[in-house]
Image: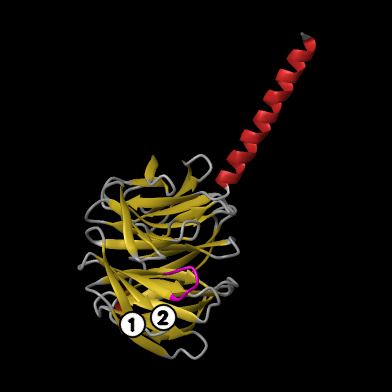
Amino acid sequence: MNKLILITVFSLFLSLIACTSSKSDAKGGDSFAYITNQGDHTVSVIDIAKAKVIKTITVGKAPVGVAVSRALNRAFITNVEGQSISVIDTNSNLVIETMTIKGSPVGITIAPDNKTLYVADWYSDRILAINTNDLSVQGEVIVATAPAGLVVSADSKTLYVAARDTNDIAVIDAASLTIRKRISVGKHPFGLTLSPDGKMLYSVNVYDNTVSVIHTDTFKQHTLTVGEHPYCAVLNANNSMIYVTNTQDDTVSVIDLITLKIIKTIDVGMTPEGISFDATNNQILVASWGDNEISVIDAATNTLKTRIKTGDKSRAFGQFILTSK
C-alpha cells in the first residue's frame, strides 16, 4: 500500500514537471499588444496568439503613445490630455505609477539599452529624457513646433525626432541632448522608423502623402508616394518591406524596399494609425481609430487575417508589441 502511494506521488510529481515545462515553453513564444484607446482612457491588452483582449487597463486621460520593454517588464503610456505618463507592469498588467508631465506628451520611445525613456511634449515643443530606473527627468531639449514620432539608434546614441510643423527631422545626440543636424523632409512628418543597422531612416509625411527614405550616413533621400494622409510605418522581419498606414484611405501601403515601389494596398479598419510588427507570429498589427479595432495582417502573404475589437478610438502610436523572448 505504501509502495503504491509512493508510485502515485512520484507519477504526479513527474506530471507536474511536464506541465510546468510545457507552460514555460509556450510562454516563450507569447506576444502581447498594448493598445491605447484615446476615447475611453484605457489600454487594451491583446493576447496576439488568441486574437483577443485579455485585459482592459484604465490609465490617464486620452492615452495616445505607447512604448514597451521586455527587459523592464513595462509599458509606458502617454496621456495627452491627462498630462501624464502611466507606467504599467506587464507581468501583472496593473498601473504601478503615474508620472505628471507639465505639458502634453504624445510620442514616446525607449532607447535599446533600456536606460532612457524619451517623451515628445507636443505643445511645449520639447523632448524629455527620463531615467527608466527611477523616472527622474535627466534633461530636455527644445526641438521645434509639435514634435511627434521618435526613434533611437541601436547603439542608443542618436535620437531622431519628427518635427511636424517645421517639416524636418531633428538628429539629436542622446548623451548631450544637443541637436546635431536637421533633415528637411515632406510636409508634416509624424511617424518614424529606423532600420536595425541604423543606416536607413523612414519619415511618414502626412500632408504630402509621402515617405522620405533617408540614408543616415549621407542624409541623401528618396521620396515614395503612398496613400492619403499617411501616419506611421513599420518594417518587416528582414527589412525588405515597409508597411505604411493611410488614415484617409483606410489602407496600408506595402512597399518593396529593393524596387522602392508599392506592391500591394491592403484594406484595413477605418482611420488606421499605429502599426507594429509581431516577430513571433510574422504579423503586422494596425490600430484603427475609426473602427475601434486591430487589423492583423499576415506578413508572409500580405493579406488581412482577422480583426480584434478594442476600446474607443484606438491610437497605439509607437512600439506596442511585447514579446516574451
Point out residue 195 in the picture as x, y percentages from the top left corner. 49, 75
Front position in the image: 298 or 143: 298
Q: Where is mark 2, residue-wise?
A: 257
Q: Quadrant of residue 183?
A: bottom left
Q: Residue at x 34, y 61 (%)?
A: 274
Q: Residues within 10 Å of mark 2 (few under 14, many from 20)?
A: some
Q: Main secondary structure of the magenta part?
A: loop
Q: Taking 241 as reference, is 174 left or right? A: right
> Visible in this render: residue 144?
no
Amino acid of disc 2: Leu
Point out residue 295 in the picture as x, y percentages from the top left corner. 31, 56
Quarter holding the C terminus is bottom right
Spatial CA span between label 1 and label 2: 7 Å
Q: Taking 216 as reference, is 248 left or right? A: left
Amino acid of disc 1: Lys
* Part of the protein shown in magenta: 235-240
Q: Is 236 part of what is drawn in magenta?
A: yes
Point out residue 237 in the picture as x, y percentages from the top left corner. 49, 68
Q: Taking 322 as reference, is 81 left or right? A: left
Q: Residue at x 32, y 46 (%)?
A: 41
Q: Where is mark 1, residue-wise?
A: 261
